[in-house]
């Protein structure tokens, strides 16, 4: 699966100008589908990307308002991508929500030290994701 | 004889201090050496001179040279004897060469063989002289009764010797009574001979000048001087002087003080000179006055008798008697010491008598065996005399004995001066020398056809002429005595040196060698320095080295205080020395402490026993330290093992963390989908039916994935823990492959599977193994091929081959295979390749590996093939667990 930009729910979005965008970088297809459904329903413009290799390129291309970043990705880990992101002048302040299924405290420490804004362990309640994004983007 | 008893008794009974004064007189020591001059010398020298001219002088020349020119080496001998508590020649040689009892027995036997004829000689001279005396007296007719006189003398001497020779078992084997008696006898025989000499010169010949004319007229001066005989005999006498048992006894064993040697070194040659002074005049006058055919061996006695001077004759008789008895007594003591110490006592101990006895009993046994030996030695001499009476040449027997005992010489001197001398060398030398002596001299000396057939004497054994006893190796022209002395001593010394050079000494031999050869370094001079302060200082220096300075100084100063002395150096009193020895022995061991203190105080020289004990202690310490080393090595090993175990645990812990992390990930991922979609379904009443259906099926799918994961985890855990129950049964390999293929393909035709059996009859091959588990492995491998094979028309070839007691089954697909860097890890848990389409948790191959290993086989990835190729190798009969 390669880049997939889906304009799901664009018709229901309040205005194009005020619409916030989020890029989901995640390799599990079912999780992508669930997140896209939840976020689109709340008016987010959702981009998705499913591997670590060119995730950084995808971020630069889409210029989202926030990124949901999985840790275990094929090709390149979420931590590496975050490290690059924080080193990139234009992207250093991009809000990032990290997701992981490993659920150990050292993962959270790692994420924080690398500059993740928020960190969540799978599985999560759908409302938690929405609250977290609102907190990051202020929407 | 009675006089002898009283002298000896008086000497033994003297109060200690008087005794010390008397025996410290060097002249007593010197006179006791005169035991060298036996009846043979007393009577025989004159006979010798009458027969062979001046050659008799060699008998005096040898010992004089030794005493005068070589007294320092005698001092060494005496020092060794004292410091090693040597009791006899046999003891000396055995002690030097590693306490070899074989050597001791050899030397003892040689001594007995050499001494017995000599004792017989003494008995004979006593008997002959008595007979001569009695014949002239004519009042008593004892002629037919000479045998009983010899017996009476023998018994009397044996009794005297037993009485004074074994009164006590002194460690030093010193017999003051005997020595005193012998000194008195020495005076008697000298006075007797001088008296006869004076009588002959001034009484018979009427002055010195007329005596000289008598001598000139006699054949004595005209006897040719044969240099070979002179040299040989002088050498022989010198050797005998050193090694004759009785000489060793008085020279070394009975020596009270080394300093006495200094006096003896001039006084004894002087004594010998006096003894020989009138030999020639007496012989010449005897030849002139006595009728032809008179025995010249008895001139000393018969000359005064013939002139009617019975008083003088009695004195001469007493001189001869003294010479004979002193020789018999000392020889009996010396030889019996050897026989008792080296033959009887060892035999008795070996016979088991010594097993449970206390030392007191051993003393009794030794005393008894000593007494028995003395009696035996004297009796043997008597028997020899009894059976060989008739042979009249006394001097000949004496020289034969000399030559026999001289065989001890090379080993003795070699042992004293050459550290390289070994036991084997000494054994070889003494035995070869003794054999040559026996063969060339002793056996032929009994006369033709007595002990050695005429035939052999004339032509050699088996007609081999160069083995003739009197012309060994074709050497002719010497007389038998010199011939035998030459060959026996040459072969003796030669083999001693050669064997010593090629053999290795034992540790005891090395130690003793050093002790003997360097005796002056090891033992202090008897009048060692007595400076007490210096001694105590030395003790302190030694104690500091061993105990450490503070402790040693505290010990010394407290001892000094206790003695009421100022300063820190106490007097070396016996109490203090004992205390110090105790303290030191705690550190270095008792024997070492004893030896060290003995060395410094000079009271005790270090004996072999001490050194052996030191060596034992050192060995124990080395043993102890090697034990410590072993323990330390063990600790190191344990520590290494612990570290390895810890590393392994750490590694396991890291692996466990990684595993838990993986499991968490594999569990949480499907749960995330399930939770998210179930919330969507719960909250979204307005969802279109098709979305509802889709989301429900996703939930269902993920739930199944979770179940599979849990199944695999449990399976793996059971396999890894080794608690799995294998259900071993027999079945055809082909059936297992077919069933697995069918199951893995699940009716789909997306993978073409071909199965080959090589050779074809392998189809019927039956395995005895867990067929269900094996099927599980096959299903996994086929399913993997179905999942991962990326060829356009995926194909899997299964090949089963027989490899000895194993079957080898390859699964090869036509895809792109496993990347090289992943090939090493695919059998690890969760080593799923990055591609997610398999949908498994990455435990399949790990489970396969566990199963195959349980069944006694192996599974591997075969690199280099066209596609992915897995190989299962399996024993035909799975081993029982």
Image (cartoon, rainbow, N blue to C red):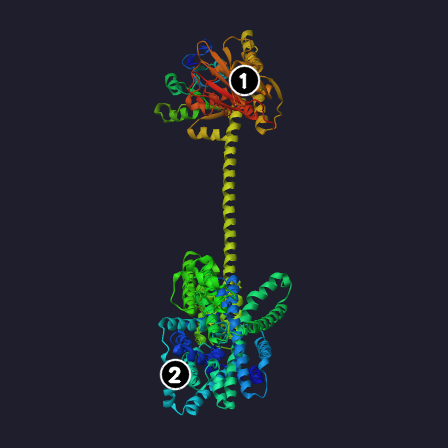
Q: Quadrant of residue B769?
A: top right
In depth, the one of B820 and B152 nearer the eye is B152
Q: Quadrant of residue B268?
A: bottom left
* Total tally of numbered discs in the picture: 2
* Chain under disc 2: B
CA gap, disc 2 and disc 1: 131 Å
Q: Are marks 2 and 1 on the same chain?
A: yes
- Disc 1 crowd, CA 10 A, few/some/many (<14, 14-19, 20+): many
**Residue B591 at least partly seen:** no
- Disc 2 crowd, CA 10 A, few/some/many (<14, 14-19, 20+): many
Above-or-below relation of B760 to B460: above
Above-or-below relation of B333 to B725: below
Residue B235 badge: none
Q: Position of residue B755 (x, y in %)?
A: 51, 12
Q: Position of residue B469 (x, y in %)?
A: 44, 63
Q: Which residue is mark 2?
A: B218
For residue B48, side relative to residue B360 (left or right): left
Quarter in which the N terminus of chain B is drawn: bottom right
Q: Secondary structure at mark 1?
A: helix
Q: Secondary structure at mark 2?
A: loop
Quarter in which the C terminus of chain B is drawn: top right
Q: Residue at x 51, y 57 (%)?
A: B619
Q: Position of residue B672 (x, y in %)?
A: 53, 20
In depth, the one of B362 and B398 nearer the eye is B398
* Chain under disc 1: B
Of badges 2 and 1, the one in the foreground is 2
Residue B778 badge: 1
Work out whether mark 2 precedes mark 1 in sequence or the reverse, and give the earlier one: 2
Q: Position of residue B55 (x, y in %)?
A: 39, 76
**Residue B165 at least partly seen:** yes
Task: For the residues labelled 2 and 1, say whether their Cβ atoms are less than 8 Å apart.
Answer: no
């Amino acid at each position: 699966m390669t880049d997939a930009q889906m304009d799901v729910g664009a018709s229901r979005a309040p205005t194009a100008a005020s619409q916030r965008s989020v890029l989901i970088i995640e390799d599990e297809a079912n999780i992508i589908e669930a997140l896209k459904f939840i976020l689109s329903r709340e008016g987010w413009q959702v981009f998705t990307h499913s591997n670590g290799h060119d995730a950084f390129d995808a971020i630069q291309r889409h210029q989202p308002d926030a990124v949901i970043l999985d840790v275990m990705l094929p090709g390149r880990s979420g931590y590496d991508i975050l490290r690059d992101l924080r080193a990139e002048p234009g992207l250093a302040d991009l809000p990032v929500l990290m997701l992981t299924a490993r659920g150990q405290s050292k993962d959270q420490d790692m994420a924080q030290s690398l500059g993740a804004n928020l960190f969540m362990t799978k599985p999560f309640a759908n409302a938690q994701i929405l609250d977290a994004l609102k907190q990051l983007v202020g929407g | 004889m009675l006089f002898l008893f009283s002298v000896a008794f008086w000497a033994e009974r003297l109060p200690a201090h008087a005794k010390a004064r008397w025996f410290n007189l060097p002249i007593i020591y010197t006179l006791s050496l005169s035991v060298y001059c036996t009846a043979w010398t007393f009577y025989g020298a004159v006979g010798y001179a009458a027969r062979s001219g001046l050659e008799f002088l060699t008998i005096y020349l040898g010992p004089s040279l030794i005493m005068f020119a070589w007294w320092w080496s005698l001092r060494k001998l005496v020092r060794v004897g004292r410091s090693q508590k040597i009791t006899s020649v046999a003891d000396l040689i055995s002690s030097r060469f590693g306490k070899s009892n074989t050597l001791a027995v050899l030397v003892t036997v040689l001594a007995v063989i050499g001494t017995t004829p000599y004792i017989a000689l003494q008995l004979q001279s006593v008997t002959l002289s008595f007979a001569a005396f009695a014949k002239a007296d004519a009042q008593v007719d004892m002629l037919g009764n000479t045998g009983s006189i010899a017996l009476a003398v023998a018994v009397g001497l044996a009794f005297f010797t037993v009485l004074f020779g074994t009164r006590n078992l002194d460690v030093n084997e010193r017999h003051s009574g005997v020595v005193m008696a012998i000194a008195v006898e020495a005076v008697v025989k000298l006075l007797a001979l001088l008296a006869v000499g004076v009588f002959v010169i001034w009484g018979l010949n009427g002055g010195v000048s007329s005596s000289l004319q008598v001598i000139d007229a006699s054949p004595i001066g005209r006897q040719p001087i044969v240099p070979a005989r002179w040299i040989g005999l002088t050498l022989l006498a010198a050797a005998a002087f050193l090694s004759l048992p009785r000489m060793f006894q008085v020279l070394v064993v009975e020596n009270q003080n080394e300093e006495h040697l200094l006096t003896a070194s001039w006084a004894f040659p002087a004594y010998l000179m006096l003894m020989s002074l009138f030999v020639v005049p007496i012989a010449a006058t005897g030849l002139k006055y006595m009728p032809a055919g008179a025995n010249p061996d008895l001139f000393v006695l018969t000359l005064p008798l013939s002139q009617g001077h019975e008083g003088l004759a009695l004195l001469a008789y007493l001189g001869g008697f003294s010479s004979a008895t002193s020789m018999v007594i000392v020889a009996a003591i010396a030889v019996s010491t050897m026989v008792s110490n080296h033959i009887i006592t060892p035999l008795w101990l070996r016979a088991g008598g010594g097993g449970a006895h206390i030392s007191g009993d051993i003393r009794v046994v030794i005393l008894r065996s000593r007494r028995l030996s003395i009696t035996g030695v004297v009796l043997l001499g008597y028997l020899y005399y009894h059976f060989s009476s008739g042979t009249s040449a006394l001097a000949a027997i004496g020289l034969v004995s000399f030559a026999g005992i001289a065989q001890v010489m090379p080993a003795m001197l070699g042992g004293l001066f050459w550290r390289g001398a070994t036991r084997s060398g000494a054994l070889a030398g003494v035995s070869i020398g003794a054999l040559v002596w026996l063969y060339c001299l002793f056996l032929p000396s009994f006369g033709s056809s007595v002990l050695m057939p005429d035939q052999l004497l004339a032509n050699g054994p088996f007609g081999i002429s160069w083995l003739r006893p009197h012309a060994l190796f074709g050497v002719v022209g010497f007389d038998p005595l010199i011939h035998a002395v030459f060959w026996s001593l040459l072969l003796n010394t030669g083999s001693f040196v050669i064997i010593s050079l090629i053999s290795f000494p034992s540790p005891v031999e090395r130690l003793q060698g050093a002790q003997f050869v360097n005796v002056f370094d090891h033992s202090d001079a008897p009048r060692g320095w007595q400076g007490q302060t210096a001694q105590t200082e030395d003790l302190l220096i030694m104690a500091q080295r061993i105990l450490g300075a503070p402790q040693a100084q505290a010990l010394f100063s407290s001892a000094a205080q206790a003695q009421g002395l100022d300063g820190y150096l106490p007097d070396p009193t016996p109490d203090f020395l004992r205390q110090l020895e105790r303290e030191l022995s705690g550190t270095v061991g008792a024997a070492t402490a004893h030896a060290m203190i003995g060395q410094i105080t000079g009271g005790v020289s270090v004996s072999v026993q001490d050194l052996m004990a030191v060596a034992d202690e050192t060995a124990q310490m080395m043993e102890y330290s090697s034990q410590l080393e072993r323990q330390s090595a063990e600790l190191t090993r344990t520590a290494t093992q612990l570290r390895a175990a810890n590393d392994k645990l750490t590694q396991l812990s890291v692996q466990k963390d990684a595993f838990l992390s993986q499991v968490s990930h594999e569990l949480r991922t499907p749960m995330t989908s399930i939770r998210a979609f179930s919330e969507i379904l719960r909250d979204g009443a307005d969802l279109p039916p098709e979305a509802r259906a889709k989301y429900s099926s996703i939930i269902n799918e993920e739930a199944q994935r979770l179940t599979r994961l849990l199944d695999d985890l449990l399976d793996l855990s059971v396999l890894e823990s080794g608690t799995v129950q294998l259900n071993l049964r027999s079945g055809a390999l082909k059936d297992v492959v077919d069933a697995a293929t069918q199951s893995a393909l699940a009716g789909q035709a997306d993978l073409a599977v071909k199965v080959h059996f090589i050779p074809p009859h392998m189809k019927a091959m039956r395995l005895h193994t867990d067929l269900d588990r094996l099927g599980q492995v096959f299903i996994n491998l086929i399913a993997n091929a179905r999942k991962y094979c990326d060829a356009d028309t995926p194909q899997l070839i299964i090949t089963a081959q027989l490899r000895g007691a194993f079957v080898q089954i390859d699964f090869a697909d036509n895809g792109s295979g496993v990347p090289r860097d992943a090939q090493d890890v695919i059998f690890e848990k969760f080593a799923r390749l990055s591609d997610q389409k398999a949908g498994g948790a990455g435990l399949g191959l790990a489970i396969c590996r566990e199963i195959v290993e349980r069944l006694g086989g192996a599974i591997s990835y075969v690199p280099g093939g066209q596609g992915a190729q897995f190989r299962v190798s399996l024993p035909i009969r799975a081993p029982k667990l």
